[in-house]
Amino acid sequence: MYSVKELYLTLQGEGAQTGRAAVFLRFAGCNLWSGREADRASAVCRFCDTDFVGTDGPGGGKFATAEALADRVAARWPHRDAVQAGVKPYVVCTGGEPLLQLDAPLIAALHARGFEVGVETNGTIAAPPGLDWICVSPKAGVDLVQRSGHELKLVFPQAGAEPQRYEALDFAHFFLQPMDGPERAANIAKAADFCLNHPRWRLSLQTHKLIGLP
């Protein structure tokens, strides 16, 4: 059984795939925060800005099999003409923490429907084989299990998760994403300054929020 908070078509707003049309598959649940505001102060990750509780979002629900969920994902991709022209449909598995649920049968079912499969994970669970894109977003205070992938996207600043801690890891791209919230403007300035002085790192902004997409 897969529990999905929401499922929708949008543009990827962050990191190396920014601007790419994608189906976002948001799984319910996380291992670093319950998602309840009453538990935020005691959570490992306290700055999450995403609702991943329950299955009541657009396209959300419970799916008994990988095939059923993959069919629902495929139904959200309307660009049949693009597929015929050789454009690969793309699905981003996110959360919460998607690796609590994303498994080899679902990856295979999505591949069978022509999708490239990406994941956005906090890195505390090893990624299953077969993924086409792995984005790890480390959080302070936890052990990083998934230490390789395509991009590392660090929410910045985080005490105890300074960028220098991750620079030796096996990733092709390193991004700083300014922490959202009341200090967003100051955090953007700090992240930009860090990238100017440490050019291995690139700035990632949440462009979907800037243009009003979910």
Image (tube, rainbow, N blue to C red):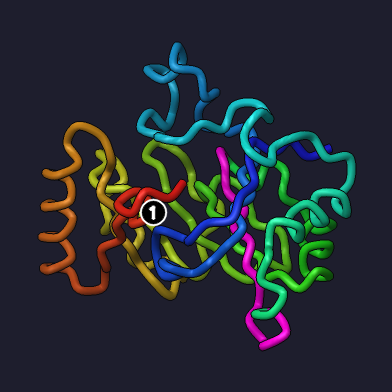
Position above or below: 7 against 151: above
Residue at 46% from the left image edge and 35% from the top image edge:
50
Position above or below: 194 against 85: above
Residue sitting nearer the eye, 137 or 178: 178
Percent of width and height locating residue 126:
63, 53
Residue sitting nearer the eye, 177 or 146: 177
Q: Is residue 128 magenta?
A: no
User: Does residue 91 appear left or right of residue 2 in this picture?
Assistant: left
Position above or below: 12 against 181: below
Image quarter for residue 4? top right
Residue sitting nearer the eye, 18 or 44: 18
Q: Which residue is mark 1?
A: 208
Residue at 44% from the left image edge and 23% from the top image edge:
43
Amino acid type, label 1: His
Image quarter for residue 171? bottom left
Residue at 88% from the left image edge and 39% from the top image edge:
64
Quarter of the N terminus within the rendering: top right
User: Does residue 50 appear left or right of residue 83 in this picture?
Assistant: left
Q: Is residue 84 magenta?
A: yes
Percent of width and height locating residue 86:
67, 87
Which residues fall within the magenta stretch? 83-96
